[in-house]
Image (cartoon, grey):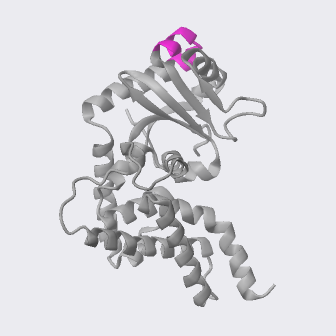
Amino acid sequence: MNDHDWLAEQFETHRGHLRAVAYRMLGSRSEADDAVQDAWLRLARSDTSDVHNLRAWLTTVVGRVCLDMLRSRKARREEPMGIDVPAAAAGRDHGRDPQEAALLADSVGLALLVVLDRLTPAERLAFVLHDMFAVPFEEVAAVLGRSPTASKMLASRARRRVRQGTMPDSDLDRHWEIVDAFLAAARDGDLAALVALLDPDVTARADAVAAPPGFPRLARGAQSVARQALMFSHRAGSARPALVHGLPGILVAPHGDPALVLTFLISVDKIVEIEVVADPARLRTLHVVPRTG
């Protein structure tokens, strides 16, 4: 195998990760694919003999490409156009097909996607690379052309805007009450209490790692979802409330490292959707902050 073929093989192993980074940065499947392709062209032209971590190198390259694309996008908007709400969140097409909407909703969450689109390009890059993909601030700074301290400030500002923008304080408090009640009912094995918290048409999705063999990955309806929640009750003892991308959720970390995360979509004081994530690759992309107090 020659060097070019080896590089191509290595690139393919990281393609999924790079597309995930680009989706979060750009919110567009076609633009994300363009950014990933641009990263491959830069890799093919570069001397990587001194690169010890190709995944990290490619992540920063994709970040730099996406930053340029975001800045170009902003520059083309010569007049204020209001909030550019992503089509998946706004229910409009704008060229985004259902597959793309599903990918974005799955990988980011609609509430976060809307807020990310309101950040400046530099804020978005600092938040996405550091908070969602654990890229060190020294590398973020190199992409932005700023100091690590300035990059930390950008990420901190973006983090505050994400927390503030995804949920008003009054709604946040009420949603915490609902998540706390869900966790208490799961721990107590209280089917009736769980059903009372769920919308009649609630859906629950579990990824392949979270769902044991033969266990349904999708459940619909309050009774079905409540019974499914009780089957996970043995893990509730090590579960605790946590912010997941700025929204109330549940973290299960029996040995300190996240093993399971539950996210909730709540409307009119009822849980309308639950997602259960246990895939280590997915868990690494989630911004989870355990609640204190």
Residue 269 spot, x, y in % from top left: 37, 21
Farthest right residue in view: 1
Quadrant for the N terminus in the image? bottom right
Q: Does the magenta stretch include residue 57?
A: no
Residue 52 spot, x, y in % from top left: 62, 79
Horizontal side, residue 90 vs residue 41: left or right: left
Q: Quadrant of residue 2?
A: bottom right
Q: Name which residue lies at 62% across and 26% down.
A: 219
Q: Name which residue lies at 30% across and 58% down.
A: 119
Residue nearest the viewer, comparing 262 with 114:
114
Number of dots carrying numbers: 0
User: Is residue 121 shown to the viewer in this render?
Assistant: yes
Horizontal side, residue 152 vs residue 272: left or right: left
Residue 38 spot, x, y in % from top left: 52, 78
Farthest left residue in view: 79
201 up-or-down from 124: above or below: above
Residue 117 spot, x, y in % from top left: 34, 56
Horizontal side, residue 228 vs residue 106: left or right: right
Stretch in magenta: 185-196
75 up-or-down from 247: above or below: below
Q: Name which residue lies at 38% across and 46% down.
A: 92
Farthest top residue in view: 192
Residue nearest the viewer, comparing 75 with 67:
75
